[in-house]
């Protein structure tokens, strides 16, 4: 019995898997010991993903994508192989969220200028790169500068300019 060799190595898929594993490891550490130092995260995810668990009013407000900020207040962070669950405060209203790793579009830690961006096939078909939705309570990232979207790759480091705050 012989096994057929694939025509090519799926580097994009392998890179996505490795990057999601990195996010999982980081979030597991935060769940166990909290956020160290000035670390905080902006996570943009696809609200249309079938396994995303958010309140209906959030899905209505953010029908395509949403950016959350994990920084000062969060509760119940739990991480498994498929994603993470967390409770965040939206205008003094705590809301539980379930975000699969496959739904994540960007993961940024501006405290150390680290960022990951996941491109999907539909992103490659659409030349316009839309910025992430702001955090509902207004404390999310500001998008004063547009990100360079000239290259479409399966995996790339995201420009941090869209997440920098003007002081």
Image: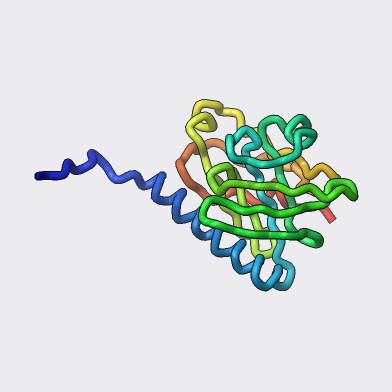
Which quarter of the rendered picture does the N terminus lie within? top left
Where's the C terminus, which quadrant? Answer: bottom right
For image coordinates 50% across by 26% down, the residue present is: 125
Q: Residue at x 70, y 65 (%)?
A: 39
Counting from the top left corner in percent of width and height, residue 2 is at 11, 44
The answer to whether 38 is drawn above or below residue 24 in the figure is below
| Front one among 87 and 66 | 87
Q: In this view, does 45 lie above or below 78?
A: above
Asked whether, in this view, residue 15 is left or right of residue 6, the answer is: right
Q: Quadrant of residue 58?
A: top right
Report the label total: 0
Above/below status of 160 relative to 112 = above
The residue under the point 60% across, 29% down is 128
In the displayed structure image, the side of residue 70 where residue 10 appears, left or right: left
In this rendering, would 48 be left or right of 163? left
Q: In the current view of this chain or complex, which residue is farthest to the left?
A: 1
Residue pictured at 66% horizontal, 66% vertical: 31
Instruction: Give the residue furthest to the right.
Output: 92
């Amino acid at each position: 019995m012989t096994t057929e060799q694939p025509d090519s190595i799926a580097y994009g898929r392998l890179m996505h898997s490795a990057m999601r594993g990195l996010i999982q490891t980081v979030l597991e550490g935060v769940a166990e010991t909290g956020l160290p130092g000035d670390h905080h995260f902006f996570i943009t995810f696809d609200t249309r993903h079938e396994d995303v668990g958010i309140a209906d009013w959030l899905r209505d407000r953010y029908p395509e994508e949403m950016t959350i900020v994990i920084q000062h207040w969060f509760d119940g962070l739990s991480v498994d192989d498929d994603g993470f669950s967390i409770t965040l405060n939206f205008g003094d209203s705590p809301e539980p969220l379930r975000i699969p790793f496959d739904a994540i579009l960007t993961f940024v830690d501006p405290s150390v200028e680290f960022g990951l961006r996941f491109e999907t096939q539909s992103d490659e078909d659409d030349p316009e790169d839309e910025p992430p939705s702001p955090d509902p309570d207004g404390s999310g990232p500001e998008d004063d500068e547009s990100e360079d979207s000239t290259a479409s790759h399966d995996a790339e480091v995201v420009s941090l300019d869209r997440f920098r705050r003007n002081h």
